[in-house]
Amino acid sequence: MESIGRRGFVKGATLGALAFTVGGVEILMTPNEARARNVPFRLLDAHQGETLEALGETLVPKAREAGIAHYIDQQLSVPPQESLLQARIFNFRPPFADFYRSTIVMIDGASKNAFGKEFAQLTAKDQHEFVDRMRQNKIEDWNGRPAALAYAVLRADAVDVVYGTMEGYEALGIPYMPHIAPERRW
């Protein structure tokens, strides 16, 4: 794999870009660009990506379009101390992929028990109902980290990918002020 180099990485980071691998070459692009170009996941499979997109969209509108699954997948592939994922912020023990994969399994299992379908196949109404139960720790047969904690981590990741850019700040009506400009999250 060809390296993009430090200068290229710094330039890309100021534009909100991350390093994605396309055809064996690292290319800087935003998570939404990676999604639009259908960049293959590094660590997640298609089903996991689909579930993260459905969950992200339920938690924070526009998370799917912003590329939440590509963002999480890319961040799972960097050294843990460099990851921007909320799992790191919450002091989860690496590898963080274990948390995301096990949470997806728990979500799909609980969704099948409650609605007869995996989460990504539910109607928007049922997805919102499920997420509300998750937020309140009211999911039956949930194992592992509390459902409300999984909700908090995934919601924070969705907020980061949608609003953690200059465009996100603009969408929130926060004016650009160079002397206090937020550092780019990716």
Image (cartoon, grey):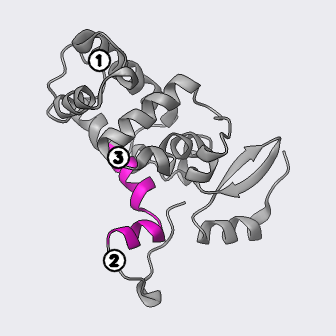
Q: Nearer the viewer, residue 57 or 89?
A: 57
Q: Which residue is mark 2?
A: 174
Badge 3 density bin: few <14, some 14–19, many ≥20, Cα 10 Å: few
What are the residue bounds of the magenta stretch? 155-172
Q: Residue 138's spot in the image, x, y percent?
A: 14, 25
Q: Is residue 78 visible?
A: no
Q: Amino acid at mark 1?
A: Ser
Who comes first in sequence, dot 1 or dot 3?
3
Q: Total label count?
A: 3
Amino acid type at circle 2 is Ile
Q: Is residue 165 left or right of residue 107?
A: right
Give the mark, 2 or 3, whose residue is nearer the N terminus: 3
Please say if the residues under marks 2 and 1 sit with CB atoms less than 8 Å apart. Answer: no
| Residue labelled with disc 3 | 90
Task: Kindly identify the amino acid type of the residue bearing the numbered disc 3.
Answer: Phe
Residue 171 figure quarter? bottom left
Distance CA(mark 2)–CA(mark 1):
37 Å
Residue hosting label 1: 111
